[in-house]
Amino acid sequence: MIKQMLLKDRILTDKERKNLAILEVIRKNGPISRTDISKITELNIVTVSNYVNHYIKKGLVVEGELDESTGGRKPVLVELNPKSGYIVGVGLNMMSVVGVLVDLEINVIAEVKRERLPENSEAVIESMVDLAAEIIDKAEIDRNKIAGVGVGVPGIIDERGRTIRWPQSLGERDLSVCLSIKDTFEKRLNIPTFVENDANAAVLGEKWLGLDRDVRHMLYMFSGVGCGILINGEIYRGASGAAGELGINSGRATKQYANEIATQLGRWGMDLGMVDDAKAAMEKGEKSTLKDFVEGDLNRLTFKHVVRGVKEKDPLALKIVDAAGINLGRKIAFLVNMFNPEIVVIGGGIEDCGAPLLDSIKTAVKDWAVEEASNQVKIIPSAFGENAVALGVVGIVAREVFAQA
């Protein structure tokens, strides 16, 4: 059983750093020879051999077929034993809750998706525990081999993952949930649980599971409400874990004023205000197939309808998405100037709008960011879509498993 202590809470020992480096290389490149592991990690071959032999004894790594050789003894290849352990990840998204169970090679063994409750409350946390329990039953694996559960949720999480505060958008009061997320999961599942902010989880998931290992500086724009920040290969959380909250707000501000500054310094809604903008336009008489999607009842309009409108090339939907992309692009340009990232990932659900949104974001960043930063940065959609948060927390737990190997 892994220690219930996240990498973010301590300085890694020399042994843990070597464990993590070697096992990450094996996971991404296996089957691989000890010599090649040594070259990639820049650790000497004796150290690599000693560590790999230890992993083999523990059953974490297995030896495979011999590699091709240019002469002399053929090197033996090693690879992870994916069935030596499993990890559960549960992520709370804009419109869904996603649960995955993976092996140590991050192959998805089981996956469950549900529509999320339209609220931020303790009931949401309980529904996430239910989902985790369901996916464990569905997977039909040895429960004793589950190394940990990762939980990704929006908001500001205390350092022990025991309470969460959901900053509300557009002038509404923040909501504090005192129910311990960590304790609730562990009491129900009896498995070590790690809790992380959704944007932080997503940025690590994109980096650790998808992008080239050389990417060191990256931002993950989680819809309009949060930003995951990767600096020199590590998540930046700030002094109290509140880094990445996208926008300012005052309890004394009216909702009207909060709306006015949302596209500038204020907090935004998850959908960048696109649904409200579409409703306002149609209430003023603008024609759109979006109204047909909800049979004339604009109160039923959701972000899914906007996405559908974009795919069907509805003029109003395209105009709304273009404006939202320009506004978000200006915020991203500010962050690009400040952090000078290599990559900005667009995710959290808004990437479903596709090229019309992405193109307008790129245009705004090009217009507003300094040339040296805007020419260098790549702006891409999330590789994992609505699975990004769940897979991100899986990555956090997997890194802990590897570090403690």
Image: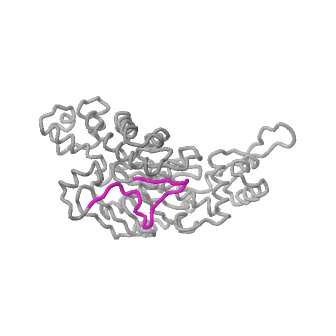
Q: Which residues are magenta?
A: 227-249
Left of 115 or right of it: where is 78? Answer: right
Where residue 177 sits in the image (x, y, percent)?
Answer: 32, 67
Q: Quadrant of the N terminus?
A: bottom right
Residue at screen point 51% across, 66% down = 192
* In magenta segment, residue 400: no
Q: Main secondary structure of the magenta part?
A: loop
Residue extending furthest toward the right: 72
Quadrant where the image shows the C terminus: bottom right
> Quick check: 16 left or right of 374?
right
Q: Name the image quarter holding residue 252.
A: bottom left
In the image: residue 162, left or right of residue 235? left
In the image, is residue 246 part of the stretch drawn in magenta?
Answer: yes
Where residue 196 appears, x then y in whole percent?
A: 45, 60
The picture places residue 116, in percent across and down from the top left corner, at 32, 53
Camera-nearest residue between 399 and 337: 337
Figure check: 282 above or below 227: above
The residue lying at 64 percent from left, 66 percent from top is 13
Q: Quadrant of residue 251?
A: bottom left
> How many labels were placed on the picture?
0
Q: Is residue 324 left or right of residue 112?
A: left
Residue drawn at (24%, 55%), measured in percent from left and top? 170
Q: Where 124 sits versus 305, above or below?
A: below
Task: Tell me where residue 230 appears, x and y as whole percent.
Answer: 49, 53
From the viewer's side, name the closer residue of 271 and 333: 333
- Look at the picture and state if 349 lies above or below 154: above
**Residue closer to the observer: 304 or 365:** 365
